DNA sequence: TGACTACTGATAACTCAGTCTCACCTTCAT
DNA sequence: ATGAAGGTGAGACTGAGTTATCAGTAGTCA
């Protein structure tokens, strides 16, 4: 749980943030990171969370994920091509393996598709069973 | 180009906004509506645009469309199921006919999918040909 | 036509995510 | 152990998008 890697200092807070990504399978928002980090190190500030996100993005350890109608999430870099499920109840985002493909067929004539996003919405497993 | 429909007044501004949706095939943002409306009726205020959007949403003449990484758009209600193409250069959004289907297969066990969004990103026809 | 009142335009205010500032603290090379 | 300097936490600040306020305007109805 300590990796210098650059000339930056190896602080508890940055290691904590890196550890949260390492041990969480789903993409996290800044607020989710703050909540999770606060339960381990109470008092950690939101500015530190954003600084940590910025550093990890620069090091390409995480990637930015934009989703419709909610705040950005950040996810471990280097995963296979996949999409996301957004729970409309708890607002958590989950990775979804695979892809339907055949999206080229949808692209209008003359348009050049560079990437695509598929977002499933509904209830996650825990919100589907509870009211 | 004049439809009372409720006890609300039938103003030039509201008719203009309704007309813009009626004669535009692609979803529009508040700013795009302001730009388009201003070219027809200079001096129209942004507050009037938002008031018009609110009224049309209440009357279910338009629907709200959330997209990743950009501002909300609004689109004529009652269209067939379709998705959207977001131009990464001009930030315009275009409707995309059809759908790949087979998305149920992606839903993780225990999750309940209620809807899905597919967003294609790249260059629209006019941005693809110009630099 | 005249009066009532909802609507408009300008702009201030609000909301929220994200950034900046700065005094204090922690890390780390010495 | 010590000092230099980058990191931290608190909170002010910023900017984009949206909403509220209010005096003046225009639609509606008698």
Image (tube, coloured by chain):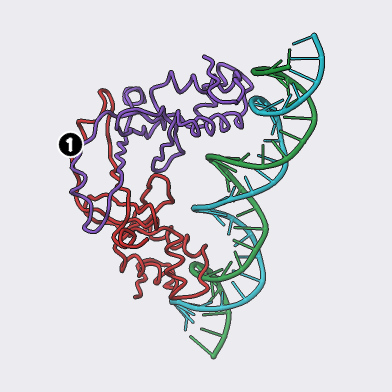
Chain colours: A red, B purple, C cyan, D green
Indicate the quadrant where residue B84 lies: top left
Report helix, strand or loop for mark 1. loop
On the rendered structure, is B98 left or right of A30? Answer: left
Residue drawn at the location 23% of the way across and 52% of the way down = B107
Residue that numbered label 1 is attached to: A102
Residue depicted at 53% across the width and 23% down the height: B5
Find residue B112 and report its horizontal and vertical position in percent.
27, 53
Mark 1 packing: few (<14 Cα in 10 Å), some, or many (20+)? few
Task: Check the image and report above or below for A46 versus D4.
Answer: above
Total labels: the figure holds: 1
Direction from residue A108 to residue B74 in the image, left or right: right
Task: Report the residue at 41% width, 40% height from top.
Answer: B66
Residue B43 vs B106, above or below: the answer is above
Relative to B59, A116 lies left or right: left
Residue A83 drawn at (x, y percent)? 27, 49
Q: Nearer the viewer, residue B7 or A65?
A: B7
Between A92 and D14, the one lying in front of the other is: A92
- For disc 1, the chain is A
Residue depicted at x 32% and y 36%:
B121
Residue A7 position within the rendered picture, expressed as x and y whole percent measured from the top left: 41, 67
Residue B115, image x and y in percent? 31, 44
The C terminus of chain B lies in quadrant: top left
Give the vertical position of D29 relative to B45 (above or below). Answer: above
């Amino acid at each position: 749980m300590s990796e210098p890697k650059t000339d930056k200092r190896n602080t508890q807070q940055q290691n904590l943030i890196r550890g949260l990504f390492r041990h969480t399978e789903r993409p996290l928002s800044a607020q989710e990171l703050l909540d999770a980090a606060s339960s381990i190190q109470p008092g950690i500030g939101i500015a530190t969370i954003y600084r940590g996100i910025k550093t990890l993005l620069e090091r390409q350890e995480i990637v930015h994920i934009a989703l419709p109608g909610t705040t950005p999430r950040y996810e471990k870099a280097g995963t296979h091509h996949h999409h996301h499920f957004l729970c409309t109840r708890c607002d958590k985002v989950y990775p979804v393996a695979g892809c339907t493909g055949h999206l080229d067929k949808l692209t209008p004539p003359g348009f050049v598709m560079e990437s695509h996003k598929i977002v499933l919405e509904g209830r996650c497993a825990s919100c589907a069973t509870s009211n």
